[in-house]
Amino acid sequence: MKSGNPITSEEQCRFENRLFMTAKVILTLTLVISLFSLASDVFLLLFAGILFSIFISSLAKGLSRITSLPYGWSVAITCLILISLLGILARTSAPGVAEQLEELTTKIPQALHKIKSQIQDYAWSEILFKEANPDKLMESGGQVFNRVTGAVSGLVGSIASFGIILFIGLYGAVEPKIYKKGFLHLFPFARRARIAQVTEEVGVTLQWWLIGKFISMATIGLFTTLGLWIMDIPLALILGLIAALLTFIPNIGPILSAIPAILLGLVENATLALHITLLYVAIQVVESYIITPLIQRKTVSLPPGLTLGAQVFLGVIFGILGVALATPLTAAALVITKRLYLEDTLGDIISETQEKEEVRQS
């Protein structure tokens, strides 16, 4: 008996293919998340190394276009230039930065003690300082030894992680084609051209994200240092450097960078602390509503809510490194989702103009 609206074999085949692709995407995401949970530090260090590789490679390609030098020589010259600049900065600025950093580490506990003495007459101060009590710095010898041992262990781990990121980045920048070719061999031959296209787009996206982020970091650091120096705030250089570095972490970083400066202001008086707070707020407003939109015309635009959600999610699962790398990971994941799932699986066509309009409206 024939039905009124029979399903053709072509429609059934198309439906089965879409169902299979969706199941494959879900399975792939499940496996990726499982692998991340088992070896999160390894994957995050690998991704940080890839970011560093993209940074070196971008500079080398720019130098190669300007000078017509081979790419390999451009990488070598780029590395020599960066090492020279770091050496010059270390020789000229490191003593002052180290001195201010040491002074900051002594002044912050002093600021906490002074704030506690000023508000200890209020009933709510007991709750505030119950856990975060500056007097707990004076602990028994065993506790101090354990803390020092943990700090040394953390320092050694940080140096090792930095070394891993450095070598991954350098090896990836020197011979990127080898690693791209090896990565593409993980996929069926029929899909390699599309995977190569998406991989290239991810690389360009991360490249432009890095450019925009470095411009933003430099701007925030300069404005913060100048503003604090004009206000005659001590340790303006190190506070500006902290603000620049923490700008790498959107949303959360600017808040964390303001805390030391505000504490130092409270040591003097509440009015100075208020002025410092207003300075940081003004800089963030200028950066968020003027500088960032101008940068994002040429770089990468991400919805703020999505960025914050990714930071919270990755921070809970992977810790501080997950928070720091949440934004570039989100940018890469968006490209992969749009191209391999929305376009290839669901059949949507998303133009660049449409993407920017969706981000602007969000």
Image: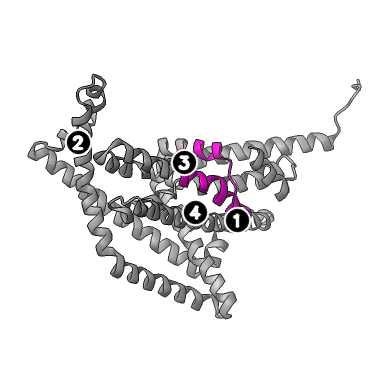
Residues at marks 3 and 4, CA–CA distance in whole angstroms: 13 Å
Residue at left offset 72%, top offset 37%: 18
Name the residue type under label 2: Lys
| Mark nearer the viewer, 1 or 3 | 3
Residue under numbered circle 4: 216
Q: Residues within 10 Å of mark 3 (few under 14, many from 20)?
A: some
Residues at marks 1 and 4, CA–CA distance in whole angstroms: 26 Å
- Precedes in sequence: disc 4 or disc 2: 2
Name the residue type under label 4: Ser
Name the residue type under label 1: Thr
- Decide which of 110, 251 is in the foreground and name it: 110
- Residue 310 magenta: yes
- Precedes in sequence: disc 1 or disc 3: 1
Residue under numbered circle 2: 114
Residue at left offset 36%, top offset 68%: 86
Residue under numbered circle 1: 199
Name the residue type under label 3: Asn
Q: Which residues are magenta?
A: 282-311
- Residue 171 magenta: no
| Drawn side of residue 15 relative to residue 63, left or right | right
**In the drawing, what numbered circle is on residue 251?**
3
Report the quarter where the C terminus lies.
Answer: top right
| Mark nearer the viewer, 1 or 4 | 4
